[in-house]
Structures are given as structure tokens and as C-alpha cells.
Image (cartoon, rainbow, N blue to C red):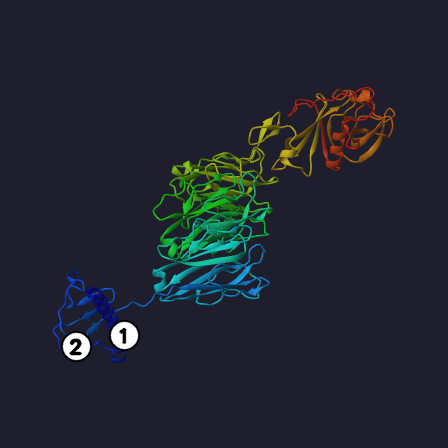
Amino acid sequence: MKKTLSIIVSLLLIFSTILNVKAFETNQIENSSNEVVEDNTNDSSINEDDLQDVDQNENTEIVDDNENSEINTTEGNDEITNQVTTNSPEEVITPKIMYKTHVQDYGWSNYISEGVSGTVGKSKRLEAIKMKLDLGSYEGSIEYATHIQDIGWTSFVSDDQLSGTEGKSKRLEAIKIKLVGDIANYYDVYYRVHIQDNGWLDWACNGASAGSETYGKRLEGIEIKLIKKGDQIPENTQNPFIYPGYIYYSTHVQDYGWLSNIGDGKTSGTSGQSKRIEALKVSLCNLPYSGNVEYSTHIQDIGWQSYRKNGSISGTSGQSKRVEAIKIKLTGEISNYYDVYYRVHAQDLGWMSWTCNDSKAGTEGLELRVEAIQICLVEKGENAPGDISRPFVEQGKVEYSSHVQNIGWQNYVNNGNTSGTVGEGLRLEALKIRLGDNSYEGNIEYSTHVQDYGWMNYSSNDSISGTIGQSKRIEAIKIRLTGEISNYYDVFYRVQCQDFGWLGWTCNDRIAGTTGGGYRIESIQIKLYPKNITNLGISHLSCITFEDKNGFKVCKDANGTLYEDAQGLLGMKSSYVLRVNKSTNVVTVLAANGTGDYNIAYKRFVCSTGNGTPYGTYYTPVKYRWRYLVGPSYGQYCTRIVNGILFHSLPYDKQNPYTLQTSEFNKLGTTCSHGCVRLMCRDAKWIYDNCGLGTRVDIVSGADPLSKPSAPKIPANQRWDPTDPNI
């Protein structure tokens, strides 16, 4: 009985508690304050530890922590009065993301909250996207930006705004999504994309890039998830974005055009193919900081261009102009966190050293092409990627002025420009040379070879070498560097000479010009080149020396090589003197020197004279292509010397080049003619073609300035001259 009564009392207490809770909530709504229900009985409170079974003690007060309510009973009182206090939290509502895409040929899809929006396996591009949040119990928003074909990254938009394009047929290539506001403290947003050729990439999150950049690959599908912080994240998160590097670049290369983008220190361009880089584009990608990359190129015939930035073209295309040097710099926030390093592969030099942050890389003033480039970003405070000793070399600075016949002192020119005159026939009479603003100490010294005086003592540093007011020509020059600068630079120079034009380049105290020939220098060019860096070389034709031999002048080049046939050295002349030596059977062609004296041994031919060949000086009166001779016989390329004495080929039986008298040909070089001067067909033709009527002919005996050429022999059955240009 007691047990039954205890159960009934307990049920009554529970029912009473429920009624009091409902009443309390109603009072809160109506009165906007808590009301306390009182009774006239003495109440007492006990802790949970003091609770006893109802059947043992009916006078009990219970505190239910879970319900935050108080239930009071009074001994000897059938009326039950309850006091209830409630503080229940609101139910938390989970947020949800909604997204839809604009798909090529299909248009807008419906909003979805999970799964793939777009297509897979249909090669359809995503062109735009919208997304929004059902925030549930949170505050905040979702923001997103897309990388669009031909446009690049857009600004972030939010909450159901369009990112991308409509009606322009432009693909989305990448996307970034992030949460902002209170919700970002509780949730991460994960997303992955399906892209052309690569399929599904890994998951990105919280504003990181997903997709690709620079490769022109379309987004085809996307999947987005909200994941509560601390919950399980997707497995694959390593490679959500494909890009060449944090900094990437492309070069326009001779014969190849634009190469594919490459980045983070890899090589763009060529090596070992002698191909010039003509233009350059540089961009930044996927970095956590804002800012730009800016760059300038030094172009052949143009010089330094103004800065370009962020993928714009620096250089030229279609003009065949080489890039010779480059400068690159970072601007904006990123420049506080990174240095940009770069180096170039230059013509003749190979890979040069690394440099950074707007310093010059390459060459200037040396006419050397850049063939390849490497660029990378290095965090501030980290070491350079390699050697930094010599990233850039440039032509040294030198200035010079010439004193010219009839003109006087000219203005100073510099660094390879021409001082003097060209094509006016005016002699240089004096010269002054000085160094410009270079990085090293030292001097420049020079000596001139002057008409009638020979070599002058060395002058230096803008003092005069030569003469003024004496009408004396400079014929040759030597220039050298001394002091510290000589350890780092070579001085190169060349001269333009009377009758010869520009001679070849030489350097470092070697002779430029002529000596012994009486030829004037008319102009000069001088350059300073860093040691071992030049494509000029040292020409064997930088200097021509005319040495005395047997009363004549023989020609030697800068290497001391004797030219017994100086046509290749001196070029063709307008007139000659022909010297026939009866005692040696040699014809020497004499050319005029710089003062008009015919004393330069220009060319020699082996010949056959005869006892009837007259000594003396004569002038040629007439020429014949074929001529009837004594014998009877015939000769080719005949030039009359005097009376019946001619220069002509070896004799033929008929006026036919295949009727050569072989026995007479094989006597060449001996005294065997009837008085004419017999020559091989080639040599007779040279006189016929190049010695005009009135050419002086001296028939003499004695020593020759040049050696006697050998005379070839032919078989007895060969009836033609092997030197005949018509056979």
C-alpha cells in the first residue's frame, strides 16, 4: 500500500512540475519578467545528496538540474505549490551552400547543395557561376572569384552574384571561394574542379585556387562542400591547382615564336642554337600577396624600353631584333616578402650570374643576344639561387676627337662611333683619347705613326698625338690601357684607310692602319670591351705593312704573312704597271702606293720571253681577243706592248682553244718565244681585263720582289690550257 501511494505521489509531483513550467513560460511571454509563485507554508530546500525515497519522507523539496526547476511540498498540506525557472538554448540550424553554373550550350543549371554542377565527359566549358549560403544559425557570407579566358582573375563577388561571363563563349579556368564573417569561425569551404584533359583535381579550401592558369584549360564541373571545423576533411588536397610557378614567363625566340609558359627558375629560350630572344612576358601566380611584376628589356638598335607588367610584352616581334639585357622588379605588397632573381644565357658568354630586384642582367653595348632566361622568387632573407658575381657586363666608356685636314678638331665621340671622315679623302692629322666614367682606375695611352716621322712617343689621357699645322697624315695607330682598368677591359679599335676602306678590328697596343705604304688614315672607331667578351675578334687585316724588297714593297698582314698575290689583301686597283723580267721570266704587277708611286708588288705571273724581247718602257696601245701570230699560230687575250711584241696566251694551231701547242705550253718559264711575252691563258686574260690601254710596261733584268711561280706541265695529248676560264 505504501509503495503504491509513493508511486502516486511521485506522478502527481511530475504532473505538477509540468504545469508549473508551462505557466512560467507563459508568464515570461506576457510580463517580460520572471514571477515567483508563493504559498503560506514553510518551505525548505535540500541538495540532491539529501534526497530520500518518497515513501520514507513525504515532506521533500526536489531540484532538477536538467530542467532548472524547483518543486516545493509542505508537510501536512494537500495543496502543492511549484516554482519553476527555465533557460533552454535555441536549436542550432546547420548552414547549407547552394550553387549553380552556366554551361556551354546548356545555359544555367539549377541550384544544388551537394554534388557536381556542370558536366563530366562532355567537353563543355563552365562560363559562369553563382552561389549563396543558407546561413542557418550563423552570420556571414560567401565570396568567390574566377579566372576567365583572356581576362584573368576577377574581383570577388558574393551571395548569388554572377562571376564569369554570359554570351561571350569564354571559359572559366580557375576559381577561389571563401567564407567571411562569423560563419568562417565555424566552417571551412572545400571545393574541387573537373578540368579539361586532367579530370578531377584535388580539393582546395578557404580562398585557395582550384583549376589551372596559363594552360588554357576549361573548367567543366565543380563540387563544393561546407565542412565544420574539426570534422573530417576530404582525403586529396595536395594538387588543386595547376600552374607553371609562382612566377612564370614566356620568351619569343628567333624562328620559333612564343614558347610555352614556364616558371620558378626553369629555362625559357635556347642554348647552343644561336637563337636570339626577341621578346618576353612575365606574370605572377597563386601568391598570398598583392602586387605586380614589372620588367624592361634592352633591345638592339632601340635601347632600354619602358617597363611592362603582368604578362604584357616587352621587346619586339617581327623585327628580328635581339634582346640584349633585362631588368625585373616586384612592386606592391609582394615586394615586402620576396626578391625576384633572374639570369640570362648570353651569346658567347653562356650562363651569366644571378641578379635581383631591378638590377641589369645581360650585356649592353656589346651587340650580344640573350638566348635564354631563368627567373624565380626567393623569400626575403634567403640566399640567392646561385653565383651573383657577374650578371651584367657593358661596353666601357671611351671618348675621342680627331684633327682632320681642312676641318680641324672635331667634337668628341664615344664608344665605337666614328671620328674623322668617310669618303671625303681627308687625312687624320692628330688624335686625342680619354676614358669616360668607368668603374676602374687607370689610363689610356696611344701612339701614332706619322708621315715622315714614323712612330711618335705615347700620349695619354686626352693629350695630342700627331701633328697640327704640318699637313702630315697619320698612317697607323696603337692604343693600350694601363692601370687597374687594364685588368678588366680590352681596348678595341679599327681605322678607315685611303684606298682600303675599313680595316679589321684589333686591340691592346697592336697596329691598326698601314706602314710603309704612304696611306692616310681618314677615320677611327674605338671601343672598350670587358675582358674576353667580344664578338669582334682580332683581324689579320687590321694592319698592312709594306716592306722594302729589291727596290719594291711587299705586303704583309697583321700576322706577318707575306702576300705574293695581294689582290685579296689590297683589293682591285684602277691602274697598274707591268714589269717583265727577261732574266727570270716573271711578270710582276705593280700597284701604286698611297702617294702614287707604283712600287707595291701586287701580283706575279710566270712567263716565257725570247731573245727578241726588247728592254725598255712602253705603253700598251691595243688589245685583241684572238690574234694571228708567227708560226703560223694564234694567241688568246693579246695586249700589244710595242710593234710585234705582245702579251698573249700560249700558241694554238687554230683559233680554237682545243688546238693548244702542248710542247710550247710545257716550255713556259723558259726563254723560248719569238719576242712576245707568253702567259698561261688565265694570266693573259687578267692583263687583258684589268690593264687599260696606255698601261706602262717595263722590260728589265735583275732581281724580283716576289718569288717565281711554278709552271705547270700537261700531258702530250692534252690540247687545251688547264687555266682557260672558258673550258
Give the image location of residue 690, x and y in percent.
Answer: 72, 36
Q: Is residue 444 left or right of residue 579?
A: left
- Residue kind at label 1, given as amino acid type: Lys
Q: Label 2's element? A: loop
Q: Is residue 15 left or right of residue 46?
A: right
Residue at the front extreme, as displayed: 1
Residue of label 2: 38
| Nearer to us in this view, 278 or 334 | 334
Q: Is residue 411 visible?
A: no
Residue 641 figure quarter: top right
| Nearer to us in this view, 619 or 632 | 632
Give the image location of residue 78, x and y in percent.
Answer: 17, 75
| Distance from Cα at disc 2 to Cα at disc 1 | 17 Å
- The quadrant in which the C terminus is found is top right
Residue at the bottom extreme, as displayed: 30
| Nearer to us in this view, 392 or 629 | 392
| Other-residue count near label 1 (Cα within 10 Å), few / some / many at <14 / 14–19 / ≥20 | few
Residue of label 1: 22
| Nearer to us in this view, 389 or 108 | 108
Give the image location of residue 671, x and y in percent.
Answer: 76, 20
Above or below, comparing residue 391 to residue 635 in the picture: below
